[in-house]
Amino acid sequence: METPVLQVTNLSKTIKKKEIIQDISFQLNKGEVLGFLGPNGAGKSTTLRMLVGLSRPSAGTVSICGHGIGDDYVQAMAHVGCIIEGPDLYEYLSGYKNLELLGAMSRHVTKAAIDEAIALVGMEKRIHDKVSIYSMGMKQRIGLAQALIHQPDLLILDEPTNGLDPQGIHEFREIVKSLAKDKGISVLISSHLISEVQLMCDRVCIINQGMLVRDGAVTEMLSTDEIIWVLNNPHLGQKILSEQFQFDARITTQNELIAAIDLEKLAKVNAALIAAGLELHTVTAKTTSLEELFLHLTDQKTIQ
């Protein structure tokens, strides 16, 4: 079995006798994009700081590519690239010079690695311009290139789309998805833009009050056991579902028929509706949004 790129086991953090993080465990596999969500004060930043060794856990372990943060920090961090909120750039230098300066701090970073990172973030045409004339989106691309020049196995991105316009957010999302799919890089993203996490991530971890309340694939999280039928006589359909299948169905204001059913019986239900002379225009599975799920799990009335 392949070793997870990131393995977090029973991680806890206590500050001034208050338990900030409580027994969190999750993992991130090769080429996977994981969203890390939680309201303000839930413990996201504290967790991220422990993942990169900036804060020592009170209990539990963090392992990156099989190397423990606690006992093999240098080897573990050799596999990591980070963007924390925004890139730290020298405005009076070009994007390329910024990458050269950072690369010079490590003997493992080559010119080829820098050029590859520039190509991955799509900055070839503007890389020799001064950073001072870059847009926010271009600066974020350079920041991502900074995280990539070490050719990491794991990218940790904390609020990477802060300050970006919709076009910049879209471009950043596509770059991240490409890095995971084409390069096999694992990505952990902490963000308040829940709709973007839904579009970008394969899996999501949601924490609330220091505890992990949900960890799973986005598609599975958003699916429900409800089916929506659009048909010519929803009241007759409601009667058939109740009398023949004992399903409690409701009719919406849009005249849609909705019921939570055993999906194995869906074919028989549809056949019964058709046999009764009903016209089935559409039959779809009802889904929720990640934002709705987040608000429900964290007891939030608004996104904080």
Image (cartoon, helix red, strand yellow):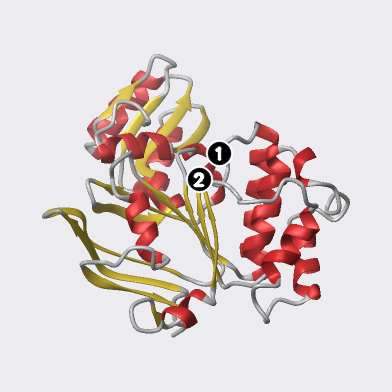
The residue depicted at 44 percent of the width and 16 percent of the height is: 254
Q: Residue furthest front?
A: 92
The spot of residue 16 in percent (x, y) is 14, 53
The spot of residue 42 in percent (x, y) is 28, 45
**Residue labelled with disc 2:** 159
Residue toward you, 123 or 26: 123
Q: Can you tell which mark lies on residue 162?
A: 1
Which quadrant is the C terminus positioned in?
A: top left
Residue toward you, 4 or 77: 77
Residue 189 drawn above or below residue 114: above
- Please say if the residues under marks 2 and 1 sit with CB atoms less than 8 Å apart: yes
Residue 141 drawn above or below residue 52: above
The residue depicted at 48 percent of the width and 26 percent of the height is: 230
The spot of residue 210 in percent (x, y) is 23, 51
Q: Amino acid at mark 2?
A: Glu
The spot of residue 87 in percent (x, y) is 61, 50
Element under disc 2: loop
Mark 1: give few (<14), some (14-19) or many (20+) Cα within 10 Å: some
Q: Amino acid at mark 1?
A: Asn
Q: Residue furthest left?
A: 17
The residue depicted at 21 percent of the width and 67 percent of the height is: 58
Q: CA distance from mark 2 to mark 1?
A: 6 Å
Mark 2: give few (<14), some (14-19) or many (20+) Cα within 10 Å: some
Residue toward you, 91 or 217: 91
Is 227 situated left or right of 128 in this image?
A: left
